[in-house]
Image: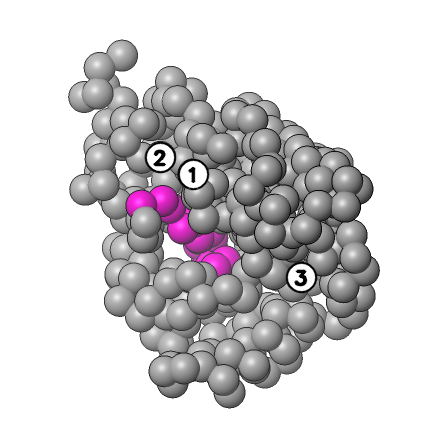
Amino acid sequence: MTYAQIRLTAVVCTLGFASSLDAQPRTAFPAQRGVALTEFPRLIKLANNVYGYEEIRAPGFTTVSLVVIGSNGILIADGQGSVQATQTMVTKIHELSPLPIRWYVVGSDHGDHTAGNSVLPSNITYIVSPASKLQLEKDAKGATPPRVVAVPPVAMSNDTEVIDVGGTTVRVLNLGRAHTGGDIMVQLPKEKILFMSEVFLNRVFPAMRSAYPTEWVHTIDNALALPIDRYVPGHGFIEAPKASREELIVFRGALVAVIKEVTRLHTLGISVEDAVKQADWGAYKEWFLADQQAAVAVHKVYEELDGKLKKGM
């Protein structure tokens, strides 16, 4: 298949795009995947009135949002990392539908997903976990330099919240702590789609700055147990349905391998500093951001093994 054949065509990709997805290499590196940076941002049709939004962020990999268009409004899950990027996303969404954006799910509370939320409608309904609400409140008070942080007024009171998005049923799920500790996902039961936000980093080295490593594995197990055909990541590329499950299992394997390698070094009594130098990541050392995230992962797994991670809320 030539580059011209696999190149995405317009702003919106149709369901027929799945065959091209299947043909592309499994990687988070755009160049290796055969995708030009000029193709971003792009909307990928996942089902009728359901889209994944991929935007490139520094240092060159995607941040993914979910868009669900109902008969009376639009739901989005996760924004982008700046006011400009989020405004661009809103503009692209309104090229699909003039309906108002009424719901926003905070899948991840990290700035690369929330820093542009101030451009969203002031009357939007936020769905957020208690842990992420607390984190956004801290970000609003302690940002240096100061920046606008949109803080949801109310957090979820249960682990599941159901939203009728104009005829489309959306289930917001808290399946356990993972990348942020406040992680929530968006399930579309009829379409059998699960937007996993940063619980699923497709071919990106496990980023553990604020993670709960072992719990993260169990959270993915909970997601894999659901009746889902397509798992959508928060970073990396959106895959065709069959490949999406395969890649989620591959990512779970990466988490397990990282925990196992760091545990081995910890058991030997090696200092965290030396463990960073001695860790053998095998094939995962070639994954996106391995050079930046590997050391962070060692520190975080050591924290977990030493009982220093805070308990769940």
Question: Percent from the top left, x then y, of residue 237?
Answer: 42, 37
Residue 78 versus residue 299: which sits nearer the camera?
Answer: 299
Residue highlighted by disc 3: 181
Range of the magenta residues? 60-79
User: Can residue 64 be found in the magenta stretch?
Assistant: yes
Q: Secondary structure at mark 2?
A: loop
Residue 208 versus residue 150: which sits nearer the camera?
Answer: 208
Q: Residue at x 41, y 82 (%)?
A: 144
Residue type at the position of mark 1: Phe
> Whole-Å distance between the Cαs marked 2 and 1?
7 Å
Question: Percent from the top left, x then y, of residue 295?
Answer: 54, 49
**Total residue callouts:** 3
Question: Percent from the top left, x then y, of residue 146?
Answer: 38, 85
Q: Is residue 221 visible?
A: no
Q: Residue at x 61, y 70 (%)?
A: 132
Left of 30 or right of it: where is 306? right
User: Residue 3 sits in which quadrant?
Assistant: top left
Residue type at the position of mark 2: Phe
Q: Residue at x 19, y 42 (%)?
A: 38
Which one is earlier in the sequence, the residue at label 3 or at label 2?
2
Marks 2 and 1 close (CB-CB < 8 Å)? yes
Q: Main secondary structure of the magenta part?
A: strand
Left of 239 or right of it: where is 29? left
Q: Which quarter of the rendered picture does the C terminus lie within? A: bottom right
> Whole-Å distance between the Cαs marked 1 and 3?
22 Å
| Mark carried by residue 288 | 1
Residue highlighted by disc 2: 29
